[in-house]
Amino acid sequence: MHEHSIEPVTLSVHRLRDAAKGEVIAPEDRGYDDARAVYYGIDRRPAVVVRPADSDDVAAVIALARESGSELAVRSGGHSLAGHSVSEGGIVLDLSGMKGIHIDPVQRTVWAQAGLTAGELTKAAGAHGLAVGFGDSGSVGIGGITLGGGVGFLARKHGLTIDSLLAAEIVTADGRILHVDADDHADLFWAIRGGGGNFGVVTRFKFELNEVDEIYGGMLMLPATSEVARSFIDLADASPEELSAIANIMKAPPMPFVPEEQHGKPVLFGIMVYAGDPEDGEAALAPFRALAEPIIDMLAPMRYPAIYELLGEEGPPIPAGMLVHTLFADTFDDEAAEAVIDYVAGSTADMAVAQLRVLGGAVSRVPDSATAFAHRGRRIMANVAAMFEDVSQTETHEAMVQRVVATLRGDTEGAYVNFLADEGEERIREAYPGATWDRLRDVKHRYDPTNLFHLNQNIPPAG
């Protein structure tokens, strides 16, 4: 809670229109419903949506939120599972119009504003044969994925997104516009590499660009048995670090490129990127093709940005009911593989999926304490999800999800903050185990002692 309320939000909207260079959208304005819409269809009505033109506009919006006591939501791409990208009755700071980008192909760096999507930045850098590793969706904003860590197609070769982060510009709760890096405000630079949006609004990121031009990869769909699933993970773990693989175990969707006789049957939908010589990549992926007769084989040489084009910008329509549980696992044995196959085959949800990402490589060579992402040594990051229209069946789907989660995780804990829904402090602490949690709370106290930035996977300030 804030102690002071200087003026009502309704009056402050008028002040914002005068002060801000960017667009200010109130409920009575045309385009309001589009402006408040977010990826997962969460229906909230903010008092105002502001699309800032620059960091000064961001500071003005933060000042309004601070002075009026209004809830502040910050949005880059709007993909928050928990709905943190939009506020009921508060202020939405929508960065999506801030798409400035400056690439230095000689120094292999880029300054990128936080409204860019992963696909937009990947396409721009790809014109120079360079890349930053983001996630597996081109429509995700670079702000959220970077601040949470960033696990994607280049993880084993080049690390997490935050492992390429050199510096950032951030507007803090007191309105300061700070440059942060390993030397300036090093505590804050440490915290934003995995600690989410708890510490301010990052308006620009400076990334090191990795040399990633032509790759070998794409989609491979195999019939899913427990043997195929376990062998796929074992192969991904033993493969060269150039290969990052994602296994989506699910029922084959009724899509045009899927043979009709496979519709509704359990399949392993693999998404693969070999970030190296395509000839070496073809050899590295041959054992995966040999696991079973492929249903779909769209593995081929391509320019790296084409992987996002192949997968498409948006996923399926968002249903009324959705359950997602994120975890880390260190083993994937026969029992775990059978549990996943049984879950997918037996679920009555419109879509039931277990997604497994093999980590290691460059991810694991960074010490846990170096950034706020403290799961460097874990072998697998997994997500178990159920999507359904009949919300009366939520408890049934939840019980099935939790059974397979218990088998996958065993006695271990851990969560990836970017895949958390609204699950409470205990799960947030799983994302930031041990000393990481205490250190983040100290940094939070220094830069946001009143918890102005609380619409996030929240880390309360120390004291």
Image (cartoon, rainbow, N blue to C red):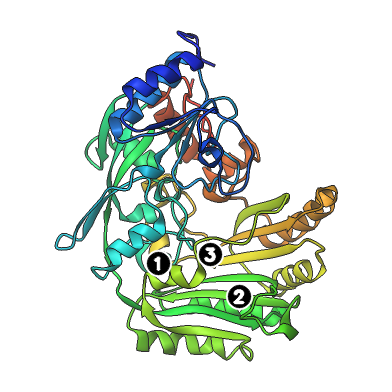
| Quadrant where the image shows the N terminus | top right
* 208 on left or right of 359: left
Q: How many marks?
A: 3
Q: Could you tell me residue 410's position as x and y percent? A: 69, 58
**Tag shown at residue 154:** 1
Q: Earlier in the sequence, mark 2 or mark 3?
A: 2
- Residue 184 lies, with reference to residue 76, above or below; the image says above
Q: Of the residues shown, which amino acid type is indicated by label 2?
A: Phe
Q: Could you tell me residue 373's position as x and y percent? A: 45, 48
Query: Residue shown at 80%/64% (left/top)?
Result: 347
Location of mark 3 (residue): 379
For label 1, count other residues whose C-alpha is less than 10 Å away and answer few (under 14), some (14-19) or many (20+): many
Query: Residue shown at 56%/31% (left/top)?
Result: 87
Location of mark 2 (residue): 269
Q: Quadrant of residue 403?
A: bottom right
Helix, strand, or loop for circle 1?
loop
Q: Earlier in the sequence, mark 1 or mark 3?
A: 1
Q: Earlier in the sequence, mark 1 or mark 2?
A: 1
